[in-house]
Amino acid sequence: MGTWLLLGCSVPSLDDVRAESRGFSIEVHYTPSFKTGCIEFQAQDEANAANVSAPMFLAGEALRYREPPMRLGLLRGWDDLPHDVRISERGMERWGSKIRVMVTAFEHDCEGKAVDRAELVVDVSGGRRKPSQSMVLMTPDADGDGYVARGEGNKGGTDCDDTGPNAAKRSPGNLEVCDEVDNDCDEAVDEGFDKVWYADKDDDGAVHEGDTKVQCTMPEKYIRLPQGKPFDCDDADKDNTPGKPEVCDDRDNNCVAGADEGFADKGKACNNDVCLGVNVCNLETMTLMCSAQPPQLYFPDMDRDGDGDWGAAATKLCPGEKSPAGYVENRHTDCDEADPTTFGGAAELCDAIDNNCANGIADESALCGGTLKQLTDYYVTSNSRDWNTVSTKEGGYPVWIAGNGGKLAVKREANKRFESYSFGDFSSPVPGDGSLPVNPNNCGNHDWTASWVDSQGRVFLGARNGRIALHNGASDHTCDAATTPTTAAITGIVGFETDGLTRYLYLTDISGRLLKWTLGGSPPVEILNTAGGSVELHGLHALREELLLSVGGATNSNQNRVRSYNGVTGGGTATTHTATSDDPYALAKAVWIGEENKACAVGDSGLVWRWAGGTTWDRVPVPAPNATSDFTSVVMRYDRANPQRPGNEQCYMVDARMTGRLRRLTKFGWAKEPVMPSTAEVALKDLALTSTPTGIEFWIVGENGRVIHYPEP
């Protein structure tokens, strides 16, 4: 190791004195930023290479606090200015005249790499002082880290970044840290550090194999590669990750063998009731389900009220199949598919029917004023009274009933009892139920078989012996039964009014005659004798004189049961309608027309027909039991002011076979019947019906004093 040279003065030796005339001064220039390093100085005899001075060094603080150029003195000249370094060893005066001066710069310290070297051969011969010369060293250390920037070839130092933005972080021997920089200048960046980060976008702890970032800092949504854990097959969903249980959701939850392994039936054919599909994943329960939607349930809605039959089996249709006509979907709370006024939740009407299908109870509301029951009025209930006919004024009251033996009674108002105008009734004893005494002005001892009441409340009567009568209900009225052109039983009466007064009445008899009675004029006259008496007529009804409908028939003839007439033209020729039957001997017994082309007719042996205009009537079979009952009377419920009313075209009928039934036929079929009292099981002969604001009111009469009324308190 050479000598560390610092500034200072010394006492010259003899050799120095001898050599002072040979002294030489050199300016050594180096890069000003070279503060941490070492500069070596050495001289060599050109004539004898063995003559080499000991190396001298400028380093440490001596270098740090000095600015270039540095003055180097060779040998000694007492008149020289101070030098930073002087090479002057004993014996150098005996060296040759040429001396090689060598200056070497080392980075970092005197053991570092030589970064530059300058040599200069100076001639020290002669006795005169030589002019100063200079040497230059390239020692850039811009970042002041003690390491010189690399040069070309082997020149320069070992600093890989002396002037860049990261120069302060980079120098040989630095500790390598992970900062994307080659800190120790070994041509490797961040060696020894794991810089690979794997994506974990769903934060489930499993990483995406193909999505990595290489950097020192941890990127968002990236983590180190977990040890011993497989790669994630779906890094967008934390529910799909290694180790998760596999569920049926069309995804590979556990990252093993694809989606939904373990659900072997997925994709196989299946059925949901009658609808076919394939097994798919239920994304709510995460299990298999059939893709087929459940069938839509349709129920028959024969009466078109929007509610299906509650007792019918559902017709099952799969989505996309056409719904059947006459069916409704899902709803099926209708307890009577023949009645459009009856269905689940319907408004309850006053009609003795359970309209809202609530437990079979009819008319829950007390507003109807009563139920269907038999009257107990004194003058109507005797078993000796056989009532044949009942008629009401339009609007309801008075109500007249008439029967065999001249029996005749009137109920003037709803809250009054029937009064007797009957032949043979006695004035004593006085009735105990509050009924008025017998009125003596009866119409005689005749079996009354037909009746009609006009707008004044007067009753017109027809008898089994062909007699007719009129009673106005007054106590001073004289009722004499008049004769007609016939002695056959009167079977039908219908009247027509002008300006509120009855002008004409038409009558039929069992011998096939059509009679016309002009009030205030001549007695009834025969205007038509159907088929010369070979045809029986048993019923008559009309809404206007131009269209009178009569029913009856001729034995063994299916073509003579219904006829129509034009009364205005005097009857003319009867138009025969077709109303067929399986029994050629069965006759039609009653008819009722509700509208110009809407009518019903009934007869013996269960005969029932409907009419919709023209001359052909449609037979309607009667369901069991009592399918062959002998029907005696029929009325059609029809609100002519409201033709779209759901209850229109209902035909009510009674029979003479002691079944005790009030049957009901709508345009959709046989509907449920009002529940009759048990005492109704006698021959029922006639009924009358009146529409009310809340429903209907009806009267039924029959043998053995049976008078049945709805609504009866």
Image: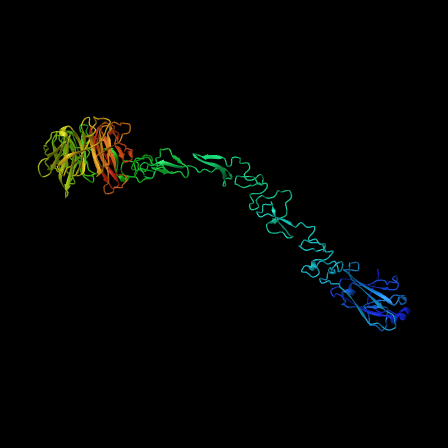
Residue 89 screen position, x and y as percent: 87, 65
Among the 4 quarters of the image, the one containing residue 531: top left
Q: Quadrant of the C terminus?
A: top left
- Would you identify the image quadrant in which residue 681 lies? top left
Q: Is residue 421 visible?
A: no
Camera-side residue of 178 and 455? 178
Task: Name the side, left or right, on which 467 lies relative to 639.
Answer: left
Colouring used for the render:
rainbow
Q: Position of residue 214 (x, y in %)?
A: 64, 51
Q: In front here: 610 or 699?
A: 610
Q: Is residue 630 above or below residue 166?
A: above
Q: Position of residue 378 (x, y in %)?
A: 19, 32
| Residue located at (47% from left, 34% from top) | 270
Residue lying farthest to the left in this orientation: 522
How many numbered discs, if any? 0
Q: Is residue 667 visible?
A: yes
In the depicted view, which residue is nearer to us: 75 or 338?
Answer: 75
Residue 603 image-quadrant placement: top left
Above or below residue 105? Residue 614 is above
Task: State left or right for residue 450 relative to residue 284.
Answer: left
Residue 504 image position (x, y, % from top left)? 13, 38
Quarter holding the N terminus is bottom right
